[in-house]
Amino acid sequence: MHLLVTGGLGFIGCNFVKHVLSKDPEASIVNIDKIGLGANPENLRELEKKENYLFIKGDITNPKAMGKIISEVDAVVNFAAETHVDRSISDPSPFIKSNILGTFTLLEAVRKSKKDIKYLQVSTDEIYGDRLHGSSSELDRLSPSNPYSATKASADMLCLAYHRTYRLDVNITRCTNNFGPYQFPEKLIPKTIIRAFRNLPVPVYGAGANIRDWIYVLDHCEAISLVLGKGKPGEIYNISSGNEFPNITVVKEILKLLDKPEDMMELVEDRPGHDVRYSLDSSKIRSELGWKPSHTFISALRETVKWYIKNEAWWKPLATEKVLHPAPWKTG
Ligand code: NAD
């Protein structure tokens, strides 16, 4: 399979590229990334000499470039997006451009190619909004709470419309919070590991009661591969591991793994619009495609902590004061 992966220099994209190439030596991948926030060329440096991998610096909102590349592939997996919720609060406009216009540009290129191309949109549980009880299924109403999730929801709507109107072979995957190697230090788990490792106070938003359902990034990559191969056209698949914990529990586990005291935690002002709980019902992908996570939360968290300790050279240049800030949406 000849794949276009967009946003492959980011956290999940780079794990996905490595995952596909290690499992399927016949696969070839073109990776388009604009090298924006979250991207790191070092993530896939080791692949640059391989014949079945090509990196092109480019923007998914560029119709000419996307048209040319898409005419040469069998499938597109769109990871490219502005993803930092805190930043979408201080400035939503790049989110509108990359997440909505970018998806539209890719869908148009697929439509105009007149080829039978599988298009997989990597979406998020955040589009369902808060879920105080129960779990969201693929049929639930979308209720995004911040500019990031609103743009992701808009992109999903475009994908479904392109399937219905133009019969494009589209799938949408909606996954819960990922963690694992190569995650940008601004996100909760790496930020906690790095700040604790440096003996800095560890910020926890509000009372730390917000609940997220955590999934190890490689379990997410495996689920995407499965949908790419077996997903039915036009279908949405929720992906979750069932690891629902309040943020404060996750922070305490990390401190324990690093052998640091709990009094390093510092409760800080909550971010505006902070969703209380997300929860996904992933029974569809489990029963229809036979997916299930292979990692437990604690074993994956231990691996992740170890990875960050071992790879200080990777995160050190990224871990600026702004990135590690306790309230990034205030930094502008
Ligand atoms: P990330 O921020 O680490 O990576 C995003 C990548 O997209 C970056 O490399 C960036 O340079 C690139 N990019 C952004 N705009 C672009 C554009 N216009 N053209 C080309 N490249 C562009 O994000 P991530 O955490 O790896 O998330 C990847 C995808 O998965 C996103 O679509 C996100 O919404 C989705 N997702 C993430 C999570 C999570 O927990 N991280 C959960 C569910 C879904």
Image: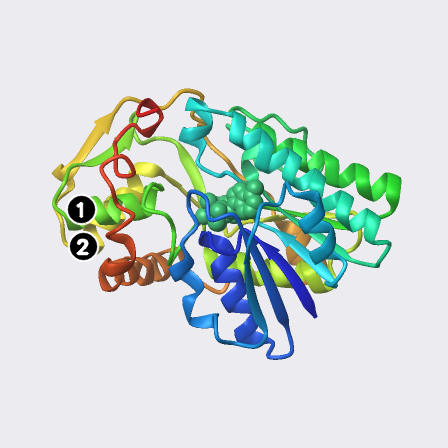
Q: Which label belongs to residue 258?
A: 2
Residue drawn at x 28%, y 22% is 269
Where's residue 230, x and y in %? Answer: 73, 63
Q: Nearer the viewer, residue 122 or 110?
A: 110
Q: Quadrant of the C terminus?
A: top left
- Give how far apart the Cα atoms at labels 2 and 1 are: 8 Å
In this image, 4 relative to 326: left or right? right
User: Which amino acid type is shown beneath numbered disc 1?
Assistant: Ala
Labels 2 and 1 touching (C-beta < 8 A):
yes
The local secondary structure at tag 1 comes to helix
How many marks do you count on the picture? 2
Residue drawn at x 82%, y 44% is 163
Where's residue 11, x and y in %? Answer: 44, 53
User: Which amino acid type is shown beneath numbered disc 2?
Assistant: Leu
Residue drawn at x 26%, y 51% is 317
Residue drawn at x 54%, y 35% is 126
Residue lying farthest to the front in this orientation: 64
- Which badge, 2 or 1, is on the more N-terminal residue? 1
Where's residue 306, x and y in %? Answer: 26, 62
Categorize mark 2 by other alpha carbons within 10 Å: few (<14), some (14-19), many (20+).
Answer: some
Please name the residue that numbered disc 1 is placed on: 196
Categorize mark 1 by other alpha carbons within 10 Å: few (<14), some (14-19), many (20+).
Answer: many
Q: Nearer the viewer, residue 94 or 330?
A: 94
Does residue 177 show up? no
In this image, 232 relative to 220: left or right? right
Q: Nearer the viewer, residue 177 or 166?
A: 166
Which of pointers 2 and 1 indicates the residue nearer the eye? Answer: 1
The local secondary structure at tag 2 comes to loop
Ligand 1 within 8 Å of the CB at mark 2 = no
* Quadrant in which residue 257 is drawn: bottom left
